Image (cartoon, helix red, strand yellow):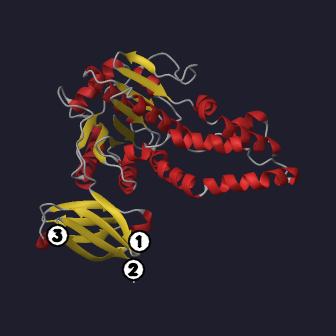
Amino acid sequence: MRILLFSGKGGVGKTSLAAATGVRLAQRGVKTLVMSVDPAHSLADSFNLGVDLFTNATSDPYRVNDFLDIHEVNIQREIKRHWREVSSYLVSVLRATGVSDVEADELAILPGMEELSAMMYVNQYRREQRYEVVILDCAPTAESLRFVSMPTTLDWYMKHVFPMQRTLMKAVRPIANRVSPVELPADSYFANMLDLFQKLDGIDELLDDPLQTSVRLVTNPERMVLRETQRAFVYFSLHGLTVDRILVNRVLPEAVSDAFFVDWRRSQELLLKEIDEYFAPVPVQRVPLFQQEVMGLALLERVADVLYGSGEDPAAVSSLERPYTFEKRDGQYQVRLRLPFATKGEVGLFKKGDELVVQIGTLRRHIGLPVTMAGLVPARARLENKVLTVELREVA
């Protein structure tokens, strides 16, 4: 099963591009699901269906046509299906502090519940072989990064903390409940946690496999949006996911010649050139600003035509290798970059702000650094077996 994650800053148009990709795959006869993981759902609106999937009584996806389903994750419904014991305990604790019943129900929705629920669906569909392609319309960038990091975090918790915590609770619960104003969680709480973890088994391997999972970053040709896209690119790489395409949405079309847009066009041209240089060799595609809001199948098909032409497979893997990786070996931070055609004499590098810039002849590669490495400077570099390794150290 192929998974495509569409991520980007809120408002860049990732829902429209995700929906258009689903429409094109369905036209090719590929069984496809487009799932919204964003709490502020707009997927049904993108298709202009005139139905509210969020309040739909069933948790089954909505059938658009024979090859396309869409699904908006409803966290209240998912709590009843997956989080009943966990949520019940949280509500009881909140009520004991004086919070009203309605407020307790709202506050018992912990960060990450929606993302984990979506992961359980993806894993379920993988096991059932229900879809050939699942497209995830993700929440804005920060939540998307939490989404992809959760399997690793949860795996660590279940292996190192959960067994000890469950055993300890069994030992102290009878005594503690006599004196504590709030009862400790019952063993059913931990059984619920274990059941959730088992439903996620294998999802981390699925996300880390570039043949199965790819990230499509959606951006706009605007400076503030681009900066967040660059950071997202860094952190997806840091988490081991492969970004195989950059989609620049709402580019002013050539037909717009009004004097009012002269400065906008000049700014976009500069940023588009910067985008191409920064993300190379990852493919960059441009989607023009449409004359009207993209809603409904007809307009989504037009967007799909721009993205994929008449013959391209939207689910095709366009990049398998991560452009660079970050490591820490023996206390030394390193950036590793594949340079298959470079020789030692033509490689240069320097630091610019929070970026490491590698220059090969007239070509430059900008590498955004994680926060933990942004304050470091290059100390040594070596090119071995077509891999450039740059060691970073603190400023003396």
Q: Residue at x 39, y 80 (%)?
A: 395
Instruction: Return the residue found at the far right.
Output: 179
- Which residue in the structure is indicated by mark 2? 395
Q: Position of residue 142 (x, y in %)?
A: 48, 48
How far is the residue under mark 1 from the one under mark 2? 8 Å
The mark nearer the N terminus, 3 or 1, is 3
Disc assigned to residue 347:
3
Q: Is residue 7 left or right of residue 159?
A: left
How far is the residue under mark 3 from the one under mark 1? 22 Å
Q: Is residue 339 above or below residue 109?
A: below
Q: Is residue 381 left or right of residue 47?
A: left
- Which residue in the structure is indicated by mark 1? 375
Q: Are marks 1 and 2 in contact (CB under 8 Å)?
A: yes
Residue type at mark 1 is: Gly
Q: Position of residue 330 (x, y in %)?
A: 39, 75
Residue type at mark 2 is: Val
Mark 1 nearby-residue class (10 Å; few <14, some 14–19, many ≥20)? some
The mark nearer the N terminus, 3 or 2, is 3
Q: Is residue 283 above or below residue 277?
A: above
The residue lying toward the viewer, choosing from 251 and 321, is 321
